[in-house]
């Protein structure tokens, strides 16, 4: 039986304006129920304003629900002490890596989180080295962050969360500001952390080709979760995705236009199907 790590129970959220809760906002959540399991890679899809970033911040106790509960390992963060406990379990990586980097040297930045937790210096040194190696940034540990590429900066931000030894990392559109090379670097890192280290990943994204790499996909629209399932199950529902303002992954779209009925998720599957359609001729 899968172990629940984060549980949303009938969660609604409304932003405040002039000190008063606003019941209807484009970013509000409305009656969300969602279980996130230990060790899984969950992608949360949705157009801008669908509520996916709000959901991310509720995972980490940055926000408190207007209604319902969000629990992490059974902890409901209804006090500051419990919120701090949740943040030791669930780490956050945001869209702009420049907003997360606080030190002038890479390894000092990665050490910042563990230092705030009161970890002993010898243990911090060990955690920093291991975290940088896990994101393939150890060789650049003495580099100044402002001299790094966007993808490298984001990997440093991820290393900072790893050094805190959280069970789960929530990444809120971490590749949105990156070029294709940087996006690929970050996605490879995410896959490695999930598959090799067993870290639970919640990836907030609007890139279909990133979502296909997840174990499970949840689709949000107007503050609600309207679809969820494996990538193949979700991307087989073209019309529902269109209603949510989302497109299919490029490989999936191409094969549908070619009349291939099977749901294809990536380039290699696409090539196989096209070769098969041509009778095995290349």
Image (cartoon, rainbow, N blue to C red):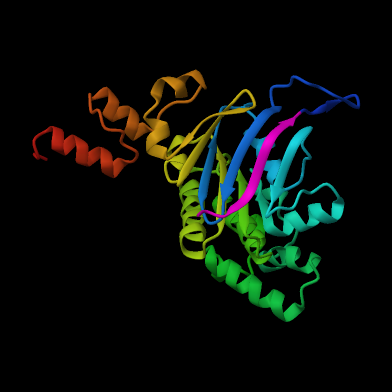
Residue depicted at x 46% and y 24%:
241
On screen, 165 above or below 8? Answer: below
**Which image quarter: residue 21?**
top right
Left or right of 76 in this view: 10: left
Magenta stretch, residue numbers: 1-13
What kind of secondary structure does the magenta stretch mostly adopt? strand
Residue depicted at x 42% and y 33%:
234
**Quadrant that contains the C terminus:** top left
Q: Where residue 40 sits in the image (x, y, percent)? A: 51, 52
Q: Where residue 246 sits in the image (x, y, percent)? A: 48, 25
On screen, 185 above or below 281? Answer: below
Let me know if residue 143 is in the magenta part.
Answer: no
Closest to the observer, 197 or 121: 197
Closest to the observer, 49 or 40: 40
Q: Residue furthest right?
A: 19
**Which image quarter: residue 281?**
top left
Residue 91 shows up from this direction: yes
Residue depicted at x 46% and y 59%:
195
Left or right of 212 in this view: 244: right
Q: Where residue 208 sits in the image (x, y, percent)? A: 45, 35
Closest to the observer, 108 or 63: 63
Q: Where residue 193 sits in the image (x, y, percent)? A: 52, 60
Let me know if residue 6 is in the magenta part.
Answer: yes
């Amino acid at each position: 039986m899968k172990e629940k790590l984060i549980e949303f129970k009938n969660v609604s959220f409304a932003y405040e304006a002039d000190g008063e809760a606003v019941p209807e906002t484009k970013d509000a959540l409305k009656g969300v129920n969602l279980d996130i399991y230990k060790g899984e890679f969950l992608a949360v899809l949705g157009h801008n304003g669908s509520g996916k970033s709000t959901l991310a911040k509720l995972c980490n106790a940055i926000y408190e629900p207007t209604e319902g509960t969000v629990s992490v390992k059974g902890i409901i963060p209804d006090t500051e002490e419990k919120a701090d406990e949740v943040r030791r379990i669930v780490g956050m990586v945001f869209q702009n890596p420049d907003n997360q980097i606080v030190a002038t040297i890479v390894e000092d930045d990665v050490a910042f989180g563990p230092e705030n937790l009161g970890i002993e210096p010898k243990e911090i040194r060990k955690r920093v080295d291991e975290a940088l190696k896990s994101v393939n940034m150890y060789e650049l540990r003495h580099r100044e962050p402002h001299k790094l590429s966007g993808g490298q900066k984001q990997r440093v931000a991820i290393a900072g969360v790893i050094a805190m030894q959280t069970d789960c990392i929530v990444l809120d559109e971490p590749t949105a500001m990156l070029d294709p090379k940087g996006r690929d670097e970050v996605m490879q890192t995410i896959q490695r952390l999930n598959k090799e280290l067993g870290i639970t990943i919640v990836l907030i994204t609007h890139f279909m080709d990133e979502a296909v790499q997840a174990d499970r996909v949840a689709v949000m629209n107007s503050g609600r979760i309207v679809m969820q399932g494996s990538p193949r199950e979700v991307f087989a529902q073209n019309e529902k995705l269109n209603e949510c303002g989302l497109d299919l992954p490029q490989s999936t779209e191409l094969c549908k236009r070619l009349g291939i009925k099977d749901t294809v998720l990536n380039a290699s599957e696409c090539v196989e199907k096209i070769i098969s359609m041509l009778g095995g001729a290349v």
